[in-house]
Image: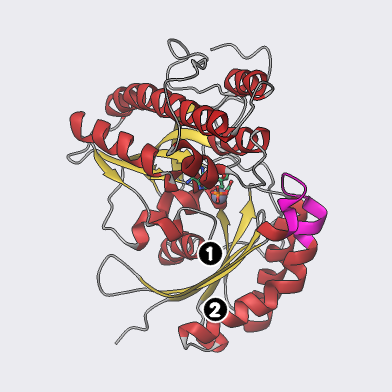
Amino acid sequence: MKKKALILGIETSCDETAAAVLEESAGTIPNLLSNIVSSQEKIHKKFGGVVPELAARSHIEKIDLIVNAALKKSRRKLKDIDAIAVTSGPGLIVCLSVGLNFAKALAMTLKKPLIVVNHLEGHALSPKLITDLNYPYLLLLISGGHSQYLAVKKLGKYKRLGTTIDDAVGEAFDKTAKLLGIKFPGGPFIEKFAAKGNKNRFDLPKPIINRGGCNLSLAGLKTAVLKISKSIKNNQDKYDLAASFQKTIEEILVKKTRIAFDEFKKICRTKNNFFVIAGGVAANNNIRNKLEKLSFEEKFIPIFPPMNLCGDNAAMIAMVGLEKFKLKQFSKLNSPAKPRWQLDESAAFLKGAGVKL
Ligand code: KG4
Ligand code: ZN
């Protein structure tokens, strides 16, 4: 019997040190044997954001412990690993380098292939860890650093339909949280505050809602939250602002997703219109519910990774690694870290003042 491929995944692109072991299965869904994530939340909390130097230092301290823990949990030996998949971008260069160098050293010592993985492709393929998902599909990637609509045509082939021209959705959640006195990362707390507030109390702007296709803009929303936050007097005011913010984000995403559905149908013909919503913000229950409802109305099949695979993890990196392994897409041992690696490398840079939509 042919040996089932065994992939070790490593992720250190930002503030999570993660390792996972994934085994090929006879079916389409592989067996996730272990998935260890060590978050640096406590280290960065007091700074209101990730401090690259501290993040890299913590990755260096923990990487071998986390990889060993993942191997131990998987009950497999290092010598049984067939390839090492590692995030090489996008992300913080000092952080990426830790995982990448560790993976290169392992690959060299074990004489096994190195497979470099785009972190965003990891999020894009994360539902494949639990669902039978065929290409092509529409992807909404909403995380702390990225907010994009992409047509996923096949492994490694992406067409960007829309992106944020300023802040990412997760970033808007974190900045709003900070203004409400919540420590980083505040996204999950905004959801909790919002549940206790009046969502109709504050009328917040929805920049470029009626233009720019399915591109997003959230900086104006943040400025409006900043102005209102100065007059906040008590907890109820905070809850109401959080609820109004959450409602505004939902409305923006519903409107822009409707446009992305149309654009996807124009370029991809498929029997099942799968719509994958991935990245840290996909853990937001209200956003999940709204996008699920919209999908059913528009005859799309919504797919969310399970909650524990929405945030950064190495299982999704191993998932991409397994697909690349089957296609023998191996990487050179001198592959560089790529802090700005885009999924659709042909897409124009759309950020900052002066962007024309
Ligand atoms: O994908 P991820 O773990 O890391 C990046 O690659 O950026 O996403 C982290 C982001 C943070 O901005 C965090 O506040 C946000 O996801 N987030 C949420 C929720 N859980 C995490 N935002 C809104 N609601 C949530 N429940
Ligand atoms: Zn991520």
CA neighbours of label 1 inside 10 A, class few (<14), some (14 to 19), many (20+): many
Q: Position of residue 331 (x, y in %)?
A: 60, 61
| Residue located 80% across and 58% down the image | 54
User: Is 165 left or right of 76, judged from the image as shown?
Assistant: right
Hey, which quadrant is residue 25 in on the image?
bottom left
User: Would you place residue 127 above or below residue 72 in this image?
Assistant: above
Q: Amino acid at mark 1?
A: Ala
Q: Which mark is residue 38?
A: none
Q: Secondary structure at mark 2?
A: helix
| Residue located 57% across and 35% down the image | 235
Asked whether mark 1 and ligand 2 are closer than 8 Å, the reply comes as no
Q: Position of residue 249 (x, y in %)?
A: 46, 28
Q: CA distance from mark 1 to mark 2?
A: 10 Å
User: Would you place residue 193 above or below residue 3 in this image?
Assistant: above
User: Would you place residue 12 above or below residue 137 in this image?
Assistant: below
User: Would you place residue 331 above or below residue 227 in this image?
Assistant: below
Q: Secondary structure at mark 1?
A: loop
Q: Position of residue 100 (x, y in %)?
A: 68, 63
Residues at circles 1 and 2 in contact by the CB criterion of under 8 Å: yes
Asked whether residue 111 appears in the rendered view, the answer is: no
Q: Which residues are magenta?
A: 43-56
Q: Which mark is residue 70?
A: 2
Asked whether residue 6 appears in the rendered view, the answer is: yes
Q: Amino acid at mark 2?
A: Ala
Hey, which quadrant is residue 336 in on the image?
bottom right
| Residue located 29% across and 23% down the image | 262
* In magenta segment, residue 171: no
Q: In the depicted view, which residue is nearer to us: 115 or 206?
A: 206
Dot 1 corresponds to which residue? 314
